[in-house]
Image: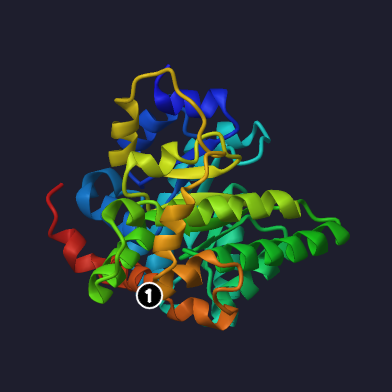
Amino acid sequence: MNYLQWLANQTTSMWWHDSANKDELERALSWGAVGMTTNPFLVNQTLSSQPAQWRNAIQGAMELGGDEKVLGLVKAVTGHYAETLKPLYQQQRPGYGYVCAQTNPNKCGDYAYMLAQAKQFAAWFPNVVIKLPATKAGIRAYEECAALGYNVAATVGFTVPQALAVAEAAKRGIGRARKNGLKTPLTIAVLMVGRLDDYLRDVAQDQQADVSESDIRQAGTACIKKAYHLYAERGYETYLMPAGCRGAYHITALSGAKMIMSISVKIQGVLLALKGPFETEIDKPVDEAVIRRLSTLAEFRKAYEEDGMQVEEFITYGSSNRTIDQFINDGWNPLASMKRQYETQPV
């Protein structure tokens, strides 16, 4: 049994494949993956790198323009994987058989727009998880989606304050759904641990802080471990999802947690090379000395402390700006203009 199979079968952790590549998903399923995360960047990546595989599926969408074209392309890709994962979904086990679709990252502050788009996504397939940003407007839309019985994930999340705000929104939304006799939706709070590390590394270098690279590599882990224990104490039903991982260490440090882990192909390969016996590490705390050194950075305190940020600040946090920009410029916008680029690709 390799590490990924051990994680899936011998612990309470689940993991989802992080890419929109057909061949990669097939391998991941054989190693224990039970779902799939995508975003505009990953959809653009698979359509651009494997045009022949998708040409027939996206013909109709290529005749559209603007947002409608992007929605058509995303629906084609998401629909393929929704069908692939349907047997897992039919097992009716929490977290099994889902695929994500993300709302337009150009509209991270537009509640009405995001909610309307989420309703479109929810009508596509029963096993779609709607990704909304962990901004003030996004979390408001997230709560409303949960109240309507839609499966939702709050992405562009990096901090404990965001994770707690998302869990509270999910709690309210789930309560409303149950009161109205609707199904209990799957709710997820993403914490992009590696992207937080990347941002804090730049902050530490800029400020010439007395923080080592080893400290930086544990910053995202410290935040998600803290959020995980707060979730357990408060009885939240929402799953935390570590994502944007930069190394296998992000996954191994959380092993055994009741989380849904998003694992990229690169990190899957590193984890497969590990030799057993394997041990769970979720209950191993990050060294307090590391926390103290990281806490000399105001940007880490914003991410780690429960009241480090107000909800209005989520959209302005450094990691949020960086990630939203990538989803826009390397994902959504290239999909909107894909026709000319796509037609020049060899079949």
Residue 204 vertical position relative to residue 220 in the rendered view, above or below? below
Residue 309 vertical position relative to residue 34 in the rendered view, above or below? below
98 left or right, relative to 194:
right
Q: What kind of residue is marked 1?
A: Gly
Residue 290 location in percent, x, y? 41, 54
23 left or right, relative to 341:
right
Q: Residue at x 29, y 65 (%)?
A: 210
The residue nearer to you, when weighing 166 against 137, is: 166
Residue 13 location in percent, x, y? 56, 35
326 left or right, relative to 86:
left
Q: Residue at x 21, y 50 (%)?
A: 49
**Residue denoted by label 1:** 318
Q: Residue at x 54, y 50 (%)?
A: 225
Viewer can see residue 244: yes
State the colouring used for the structure image: rainbow
Please state the total of marks drawn on the protein image.
1
Quadrant of residue 104 within the rendered picture: bottom left
Residue 66 location in percent, x, y? 36, 76
The residue nearer to you, when weighing 100 against 302, is: 302
If the image is split into quadrants, where does the N terminus sit?
Answer: top left
Viewer can see residue 125: no
178 left or right, relative to 39:
right
Q: Give the crowd class for mark 1: few <14, some 14-19, many >=20 residues within 10 Å.
A: some
Identify the element where label 1 is drawn.
helix
Residue 80 location in percent, x, y? 44, 44
Q: Residue at x 17, y 64 (%)?
A: 341
Residue 209 vertical position relative to residue 262 in the rendered view, above or below? below
The residue nearer to you, when weighing 59 against 224, is: 224
Quadrant of residue 331 within the rendered picture: bottom left
